[in-house]
Image (cartoon, grey):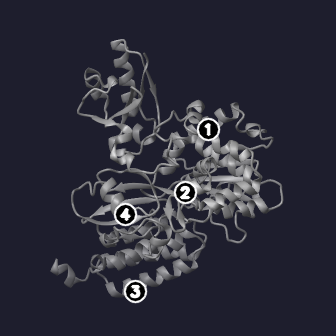
Amino acid sequence: MTITVYVPCDSAALSVGADDVAAAIHEQADMRGLDIQIIRNGSRGMCWLEPLVEVLHDGVRYAYGPVTGADVPGLFDAGFLQAGRHDLALGPTDALDWLANQERLTFARVGVIDPLNLADYQEHGGLVGLHRAIAMQRSEIVAEVTDSGLRGRGGAGFPTGIKWKTVSDLPDGQKYICCNADEGDSGTFADRMLMEGDPFCLLEGMAIAGLAVGASEGYVYIRSEYPHAIATMKQAIRIWEDAGLLGPDVAGSGRPFRIKVRRGAGAYICGEESSMLESMEGKRGTVRSKPPIPAVAGLFGMPTVVNNVLSLATVPVILAKDASFYKEYGMGRSLGTQAFQIAGNVKRGGLVEKAFGVSLRELIEDFGGGTASGRPFRSAQLGGPLGAYIGEEHLDLPMDYEGLAANSAMLGHGGIVVFDDTVDMAEMARFAFEFCQIESCGKCTPCRIGAVRGKESIEKILRGEEVARNIALVEDLCEVMTDGSLCAMGGLTPMPVLSAIRLFPEDFDRTPAAAAAE
């Protein structure tokens, strides 16, 4: 009897030796005359346990991890192919608290299936949404997505259905679907995990979007730092083309839709939709002035839907299960689930998909296990390098768009970067300005000049020079950047700076008297 073993091909697992583990398992099985098949699946999201090896025994998958190549002979000796006991044994994978306490909708198949096996994808619910969409009118598809309450998962939280309706209502002609996979926020990796672990889900979502708005071409813009995701997506597209799911007649619908991959050049600013479109057109990635918005005049001046990976990858489950099912999750205007990515100084970093409304405390303490250093928690940055810092008093905040906005924070792409009590928040404020200085496209003065002057002013504060005057100057600069910048690059940089000053004023008190008191 052939025994199935799962070893992740996810980049996080590869970075810690997953290929060596897979090779060692093959070698040991051959030496012992055992019949096995190794499936290279995506990551389950438990990054601290990678490489996580799973064995299918009596219909149940048992987990072992983190496994190194040197551990493999001992695992075979312990009978791990029959779910034997071992120091690395974790028990049935689906029963692990980290997974059992999640609500996985978008990531339901990630880590479960062979990412490039179309039959496996269908056996786990794939293509149901696409086939339902084919039988619907365009307006019905748009209405289903609108009614679900799905909002953009790239950070802005704009209602997806409204964006689709804008493009769908425009006269027929050349239209595009552009997937923004330029995932550049620190501590975020959900887009990459989805593309490497369930690429067909993204293709299905894009195809449904094409049917909904009358677009015939789609592009996935992937940052160059994701070579494995790029290779996986290209292979997935070829598989779908061969199966007739992409091309001149999408799944027998009589309507055309093709998808191509475009590689980004590593500019953070291209995460902003208009900069991404400029890059895709072969130009330097700079922000466009608005109006017109991309929905009206986007790629090559044509109506364009621009959505994030997770926004598009969530569409298949909405079409498969209907809008009312999706609306059962979440709270208020934040409906459905969000992929939270826990990183930084935390014991158990990884991806957690939960319904909106889960508290920060649950994510950082229950899922994350607290700080990796064992020192007290002090702060976390939410939503990437342009997101606000929060303090311990915010740990019971619900993670939803409106609740965080009411507390001068933002959800962003769902990234959470944790810091213990050794962090210097004045240094973090300086870093925010420096990041903006480096990554700014340079088109608008508030961002281009404000970031430089802001960094200089924070550096003066760090040296104890005219602290009160320079803090006032920083606050004035932040007001100008917020009100005058063309895009969120400059407009949101003040958020981490001002939150650090507001919540941790003691870190900015670098006067000689304060230094002497320390």
Question: Pointer 1: what residue?
Answer: 234
Counting from the top left corner in percent of width and height, residue 163 is at: 68, 63
Screen quadrant of the N terminus:
top left
Counting from the top left corner in percent of width and height, residue 18 is at: 39, 33
In this rendered view, identify the residue nearer to me: 481 or 105. 105
Of badges 4 and 2, the one in the foreground is: 4
Query: Disc 3 or 1, which lies upstream in sequence?
Result: 1
Q: Secondary structure at mark 1?
A: helix
Question: Pointer 2: what residue?
Answer: 267
Counting from the top left corner in percent of width and height, residue 219 is at: 67, 48
In this rendered view, identify the residue nearer to me: 268 or 363. 363
Q: CA distance from mark 4 to mark 1?
A: 36 Å
Q: Which mark is residue 472?
A: 3
Amino acid at pointer 3: Ala
Amino acid at pointer 4: Leu
Q: CA distance from mark 4 to mark 2?
A: 30 Å
Q: At 39% from the left edge and 67% from the top edge, which residue is drawn? A: 431
Q: Is residue 370 visible?
A: yes
